[in-house]
Image (cartoon, helix red, strand yellow):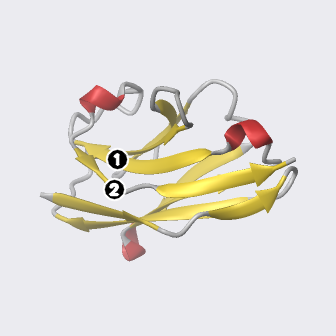
Amino acid sequence: QVQLAESVGGLVQGGDSLRVSCVVSGRIFGNYIVAWFRQAPGKERAFVASIKWGDGSTYYGDGVKVRFTISRDNAKNTVYLQMNSLKPEDTAKYYCAAEASGVVQRTSPRLYTWWGQGTQVTVSS
């Protein structure tokens, strides 16, 4: 069993940076994948980025690779999402999720087993 807890998001202005974190607890192994998804009002939950717990390999969704960086600190059991040059269209609830396939390119939320409660990120123009 894996538990995920996101940090508090925030309200920022366009162009600002923000880092959100996800504390992972429970039994997690090197092949586990931890990902960030986001969901804006009225839209489907969308993949943002993922990271493999063991070797740190990463994968990014369209449109965020240049501005967002996913990383992990195994000693702190934490996965981070650093978001730079934020835009109003990045406004969404951001969720941390995990699954055990070992395939970092998994982008469908249906494939993820464990989920955090989500944290709101709002970017004003």
> Disc 2 vs disc 1: Cβ atoms closer than 8 Å?
yes
The image quarter containing residue 92 is top right
User: Gap in Å between the C-alphas at discs 2 and 1?
Assistant: 6 Å
Residue occupying the point 39% across, 33% down? 104
Residue occupying the point 26% across, 51% down? 30
Q: Position of residue 89 (x, y in %)?
A: 73, 36
Q: What kind of element bears circle 1?
A: strand
Give the camera-side residue of 72 and 7: 7
Residue 73 showing in the rendered view: no
The amino acid sitting under disc 1 is Ala
Q: Position of residue 95 (x, y in %)?
A: 44, 49
Q: Nearer the viewer, mark 2 or mark 1?
A: 2
Q: Is residue 121 left or right of residue 43?
A: right
Residue marked by disc 1: 97
Residue 1 showing in the rendered view: yes
How many residues crowd mark 2 within 10 Å: few (<14), some (14–19), many (20+)?
some
Q: What kind of element bears circle 2?
A: loop
Give the camera-side residue of 18 and 123: 123
> What numbered label is drawn on residue 116?
2
The amino acid sitting under disc 2 is Gly
Query: Does residue 100 sit above or below 117 in this rendering?
Result: above
Query: Does residue 113 sit above or below 5 in this rendering?
Result: above
The residue lying furthest to the bottom in this view is: 76
Query: Does residue 38 sit above or below 23 in this rendering?
Result: above
Q: Position of residue 123 (x, y in %)?
A: 75, 51
